Image (cartoon, rainbow, N blue to C red):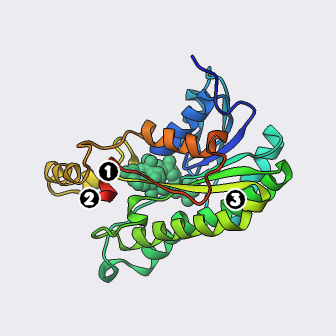
Amino acid sequence: MGPVRLEDKVAAVTGAGSGIGRATVLRFAREGARVLAADIDSGRAETVAREAQGLAGTAEPIRIDVTLEADAERLAAAAVERFGGLDILVNNAGIVIHGTVADTSEEDFQRTIDVNLKGVFLCSKYAVRQMRHRGGGSIVNVSSINGIRGNHFHAAYCASKGGVVSLTHAMALDHAAEGIRVNCVCPATVEHTGMVDLAFRKAEDPEALRRMLLDKHPLGRFATTEEVAAAILFLASDEASFLTGVVLPVDGGRSIR
Ligand code: NAI
């Protein structure tokens, strides 16, 4: 086994209990990090923390709702209390509600923006304040291919994820002089995630949906959660020390079609 890549780093991952977030917590712990596994579902956060036992680093669960400012503040404070500071934040928590602008309710639009975009703002706000004390840090936002390209029946989701791309650019500029790098990943379809499982469950013809989606990916398959976690790890780690403001598609070639 090679040397671990996040030795002595403290990380917080939101939406840690499932899919990409869970894979990121486990990868970070394998790379020696001390990780706060943050999720609105405390049972899921506890499960992933248990799964990380025995790895090079550690993971501890924390229940937070990223849409609440007090919870975002509590996340950064918990990193300091439990691990002495915060080096890495992964803003991964997200939801999807399908629809066009014509058939999306105001509540659903607002909820999508609150979780997917406001949550990134709030968690980053308090993380940046702690990272300053360390003389730097790294934030990785999880946007989506839908943040850089349109998609049918994803109006609120596309708007929220496009906002995450723009916020990544803004934060990268604002905090570069403080040594805080801010980047984002834009995954296409990722298998074994809550989001994709939901889309298949709701589909009238799941096999047709699978074929249609596969056809969009030049590599001819979907991403694994581990492949997205590997891209997040790279951007979060010191190996990406000269990268900030990067919007990285993790999409099997989908965005170049
Ligand atoms: P998932 O649905 O498997 O897990 C999301 C987790 O976030 C859940 O454990 C849920 O409890 C938690 N969560 C939801 N609302 C929360 C809140 N308000 N506060 C704290 N935690 C909350 O998610 P998945 O599919 O792994 O997606 C993760 C991220 O990746 C999302 O931002 C999503 O938009 C993005 N993404 C996913 C893709 C996919 O194909 N699954 C493709 C592109 C982007």
Is residue 6 placed above or below 134 in the rendered structure? above
Q: Residue furthest top?
A: 1
Amino acid, disc 2: Arg
**Marks 3/2: CA–CA distance:** 38 Å
Q: Secondary structure at mark 3?
A: helix
Circle 2 sits on which residue? 257
Label 2 environment density (alpha carbons within 10 Å; few <14, some 14–19, many ≥20): few
Which sits earlier in the primary sequence, circle 3 or circle 2?
3
Circle 3 sits on which residue? 72
**Marks 1/2: CA–CA distance:** 7 Å
Label 3 environment density (alpha carbons within 10 Å; few <14, some 14–19, many ≥20): many
Circle 1 sits on which residue? 253
Q: Which residue lies at the image location 39% right of the left edge and 79% below the top edge?
A: 105
Q: Quadrant of the N terminus?
A: top right
Note whether residue 68 is visible: no
Label 1 CB sits under 8 Å from any ligand 1 atom: no
Q: Indicate the quadrant where residue 104 lies.
A: bottom left
Amino acid, disc 1: Gly
Q: Which residue lies at the image location 26% right of the left edge and 50% below the top edge?
A: 217
